[in-house]
Image: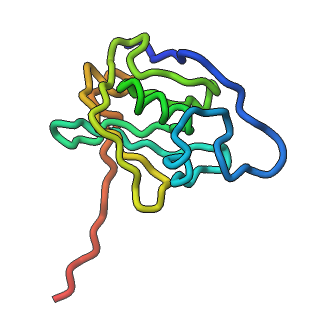
Amino acid sequence: MPASDAPVTGAPATSGGPPAPGPARPSRLDPAVAARLRRTPDGLVAAVVRAHDTGEVLMVAWMDDEALHRTLTTGRATYWSRSRQEYWVKGATSGHHQHVRSVALDCDGDALLVSVDQVGAACHTGHRTCFFTELPVSSPETAS
């Protein structure tokens, strides 16, 4: 079984009270970029990760402002683990690194598209992509 990517460093999430409009944890992200983000109540933005060369969707993860800052400034995909409440750099323990080629913000500011050069599997199960389970789709009959 492949090794999972362990967090590099952690920061406690804020708890209690109403959700803040800004980041939940301290960050060094450019304030102009931070102002464009529309975060979940816990301060996160969805990050859709795709292979730079093929456009294949590899995985979906979460970033807060600091994870985005680290990703933009190091070129290494860094995410916030909702279950562990810690930052993790993809490949830090598994060797399945993501070298970031570009990051784009969607029109609403609530999702990021991260294009990477993927080394090894993107999924913690060992698959190239996390999207390997096809579900059946029924299409309505075409009216004549």
- Would you say 47 lies left or right of 45 here? left
Residue at point 26% right, 19% down?
120
Q: Residue furthest bottom?
A: 144
- Would you say 128 lies left or right of 22 here? left
- Would you say 50 lies left or right of 19 here? left
- Residue 142 spot, x, y in % from top left: 20, 80
- Residue 31 spot, x, y in % from top left: 56, 45
- Residue 28 spot, x, y in % from top left: 57, 32
- Would you say 130 lies left or right of 89 here? left
Q: Quadrant of residue 134?
A: top left
Residue at point 32% right, 25% down?
98
32 over 68 or under it: above or below: below
Which one is in front, 85 or 10? Answer: 10
Which one is in front, 72 or 136? Answer: 72
Q: Residue furthest right?
A: 17
Residue at point 71% right, 32% down?
13
The quarter in which the N terminus is drawn is: top left
Q: Quadrant of residue 16?
A: top right
